[in-house]
Image: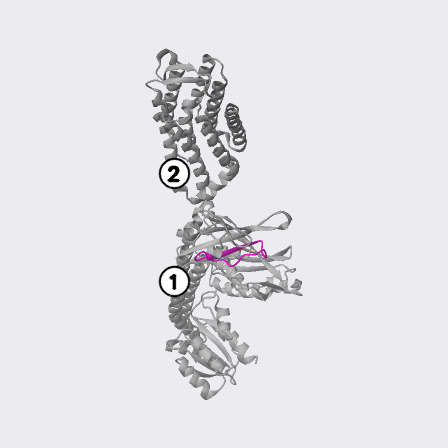
Amino acid sequence: MALFAYLGVLCLSLAIVVFLAGFALSRAESGKMAWFTAMLASLFFYLLGSMLGTLATTADGAFNGTRLEYLGAGFLGPVTFLFIADYCKVTVRNAFKAIMLAISLILVVLLWTTPVHGLIYSAMEFNETGFSGLNITSGPLYSYSHIYGLLCILASSVIIVWRCFVWGAKNRRPLVLLLFTALIPAIVNAMYAMGIMPLSGYGVQVTPVVLSVACIFLWLNIVKLNMFDILSEALRVALRSTKEAFILISPDNNFLYANETAGEIFPEMNSLKKGSQIATVKNWPFEKLNGDATSARINFDIHGERYYSASIDEIIGAGAKLLGHIILIQNVTEVVLSAKIAEQASQAKSNFLATMSHEIRTPMNAIIGMAQIQMQSEDLPQEYALAMNRIYNSGNTLLGIINDILDMSKIETGMMELNPVSYDTPSLIHDVAQINAVRIGSKPLKFLLEVDESLPSNLIGDALRLRQILNNLLSNAIKYTEEGHVKLSVSHFVQDDDVMLRFVVEDTGHGMKTEDMEKLYSLYLRFNSALNSAAEGTGIGLSITKNLVDLMDGTIEATSEYGKGSSFTVTVKQKAAAKSQAIGKELAEQLSSFSFSGERTLEQLQINYTPMPHGRVLVVDDVEINLLVAEGMLAPYGLGIDLAASGFEAIEKVESFGEYDIIFMDHLMPQMDGMETTKKLRDLGYSGAIVALTANALVGNAEMFKQSGFDDFISKPIDVRQMNMVLKKFVRDR
């Protein structure tokens, strides 16, 4: 009966080995299974040999079973070591593998030939009573074969124990079972080597039984813990090696899993038990999750030192059942800190530009303003008038350079914004033509204008930036054309719900070479230096124009023939204003009949001064020369003019006089600036118009002044035409 039980154990072990081989090979990547297959083959031959030896009826049959048994036993130790090393990601040199397998082969050959030399068994006798087919007498090398197997298994155990510490608690269960699988045969080998194997006196071999137990541990590892499930293993490796934190929680916000990266962010997760409330983790940034939203993204920081971006997604099972949440967390500390540094640098640059603009525009206001005042005098001698004109033009040129630098800075820092408003298309075209025509001066040059009669009379877009685009193109054309003509053509076409406004600027100037066309929109680049050395400018106007066109979802194209002239075509996207009609043939002809040519040597600012003796204004500025300029510009209107050198004095003037038609308020003043002064006046109930005078030309001024209680603003240097418009708006037309 015991014999049948023993044979049953052997058969069960063989069945387990065959099952494990098929199960593992079907679930794992074949290239990773070589040593595992070899280990199962060694186990199979060992158990099969033991069974055949037990069933043998002759000495030769029993010895053949022992040979088969040793074929498995001789290789079982080294291939088990190589399998465990491979599973635990330990690299073994090929030369070392060859030496181990060669030793096993030598031991197997010695066993098979032992009747000749007696090195393994010095004597063998057929046993008819015990389970074992042979009674053997150990030879001189008998113990060495067992010691070699023992060393291989012990080395495997050391690797497993080391990996248990390196991989952490979450990966220990398969490793612990693998350790038992390796240690059980190792203990038996040790007992064999020391000659203390129990029951050996009765012919019973315990080794096959022990190996059967080891097979059961191996079965648990493979089937229950998915030791060779390639998908699970791949996911574990990916989650372990990823730089993103991966956290899995249940629908009840209980902890299920976290990878090593998550443990670095939240150290308490390394010891947190499965099923624990996730909210108990220190610095946990998420509120209790539920099924209200399918996904979310949350940014958080830990003590303002480390910054993270997290995405939270639901896991939905069959029947739309919520199974849990996956949280992925990225460390964005470097990105956030870099953005903060860039933001600080951008803010510092903006502050510098605002200061520079104010500091330069303040003296420019005096230079251009005084020149404008003197140029209005009818009895000014011709030579003085010419000198004033040159001062005025040079000041405006310098002002244009300052504006270009500021605009380029806005574009580079992303601060350039469009301000779409409804505008009158014919007025915009007329104003641009009027301003640029006077740039011709004494050149033998004609300014031509061609306008399509189907052009909409009203459009919605940034009229200020449109003027800037046209002024840049026309001023360049006039600047680099000595004779012939400069022509502006205006047309449009409809694209979906948008109006595509098209401008074409042609000239008969110097033209450009082919190689220069490729660098046309580069910063600070000027072409034909020899021909254009006398032309003023910084070389950034076209770059600004290109960026403004891009902001308007438009295009700019250029064609040129060296020595004959150039043509620029700009198409920008605008919106049609409500109830806008075509300008018609008559208005188109009136605009197109506009022409300018002549021997003009002095730019006169033609302002029709409407007397406003009933009006009274207050000018507030801490710089005396600015007060003189403003007073001089206002004088032709016959207004009552009061001056104040500070915000405190302005408040006193208002309290003593009452409400002015306009208070012209300087933006930046010491002690109490224009913003604070205006706020105090509004708090006192002052409802009159307050217009800011500002040398700060950065983006967003209009909205900023409006929110601060101002009704309008005028940029410094003050332009008499802009001053005239403000006076008409707040004094004449009220």
Q: Nearer the viewer, residue 7 or 317?
A: 7
Q: Nearer the viewer, residue 609 or 570?
A: 570
Given the current orientation, which residue lies at the most extreme bottom position?
A: 656
Disc tally is 2
Distance between the alpha carbons at the discs numbered 1 and 2: 58 Å
Percent coordinates x, y for residue 288 in the rendering: 53, 58
Left or right, 92 with respect to 317, comes to: left
Question: Magenta span has 192?
Answer: no
Q: Nearer the viewer, residue 371 or 386?
A: 371
Percent coordinates x, y for residue 345 in the rendering: 39, 59
Which span is picked out in magenta? Answer: 280-298
Q: Which mark is residue 72?
A: none
Q: Badge 2, how many Cα within 10 Å: few under 14, some, many 20+?
A: some
Q: Badge 1, how many Cα within 10 Å: few under 14, some, many 20+?
A: few
Q: Nearer the viewer, residue 379 or 431?
A: 431
Relative to residue 239, is residue 725 depicted above or below?
below
Q: Which mark is residue 348?
A: 1
Percent coordinates x, y for residue 440 in the rendering: 48, 62
Residue at 51% in and 75% down: 711
Badge 2 element: helix
Q: Amino acid under label 1?
A: Ala
| Residue designated by label 2 | 161
Left or right, 617 with respect to 489, comes to: left
Q: Amino acid under label 2?
A: Val
Dominant SS of magenta comes to loop
Q: Disc 1 or 2, which lies upstream in sequence?
A: 2
